[in-house]
Amino acid sequence: MSRDGAPSPIAEQALNLVEAVGTAWTTFTLYPDPSQQPAFTRAVVALAEPLTPPLVVAVGPGRFFRGEEELIVRREGAERLARELFLHDVEHIKFIGGATLDGLLGFFRAISLSDTHVREVGGIRAVLREVPATGIQVLQRGLLVLTDDGSGRPAHILTENMSPAAA
């Protein structure tokens, strides 16, 4: 945040992207063919622009953050999107650009799946791996699990979808 209390230019850019995607998410949930709605196509245009460097935003339950700064969303759709992403164990989203209409539709289809199903198939990253050109990458929270193989050696730390690493 700047000295005058206004968000920094990068935080403002992050907020604009989050709100565009949140509005598109609402459109996706309300209309049988969201691709025909102006709010949806505006989000695709916003996500199509290449971002160098990519813009990373943290996800909380109903909230987005840029570093320690909460992005104060002005649209309810962004809050609903954050809750849905949080439900699917998304820790961060990275706006990278290059989105297409089909890619954003695929992203929303993936996050609209039940959390149980998403976990059974390996998590949201595994589901999204099959969806090209979303304009968004996700970092999934992993649960740490300590294992004991009975050997008396130190336990290994496992995270979802990762190999064991010595503790």
Image (cartoon, rainbow, N blue to C red):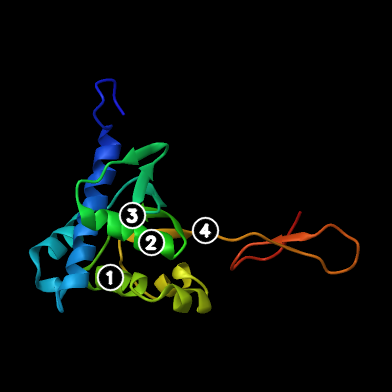
Q: Residue at x 20, y 63 (%)?
A: 24
Q: Please state which amino acid type lies under the numbered disc 4.
A: Arg
Whether residue 151 sits left or right of residue 37 in the image: it is right
Q: Can the viewer see residue 48 in this picture?
A: no
Distance from disc 4 to disc 2, alpha carbons, whole Å, reads: 11 Å
Q: Quadrant of the N terminus?
A: top left
Q: Quick one: label 3, few (<14), some, or many (20+) residues within 10 Å?
A: many
Distance from disc 3 to disc 1, alpha carbons, whole Å, reads: 13 Å
**Which residue was labeled with disc 1?**
103
Q: Please state which amino acid type lies under the numbered disc 2.
A: Leu
Answer with mark 1 or mark 4, whichever residue precedes in sequence: 1
Does the residue at mark 1 contact the one at mark 4 (Cβ under 8 Å)?
Answer: no
Answer with mark 3 or mark 1, whichever residue precedes in sequence: 3
Does the residue at mark 2 contact the one at mark 1 (Cβ under 8 Å)?
Answer: no
Q: In the image, is residue 8 above or below residue 23?
A: above
Disc 2 is placed on an element classified as: helix
**Which residue was labeled with disc 2?**
85
Q: Nearer the viewer, residue 87 or 123?
A: 87
Is label 4 or label 3 in front? Answer: 4
Distance from disc 4 to disc 3, alpha carbons, whole Å, reads: 19 Å
Image-quadrant location for residue 136: bottom left
Image-quadrant location for residue 25: bottom left
**Which residue was labeled with disc 4?**
141
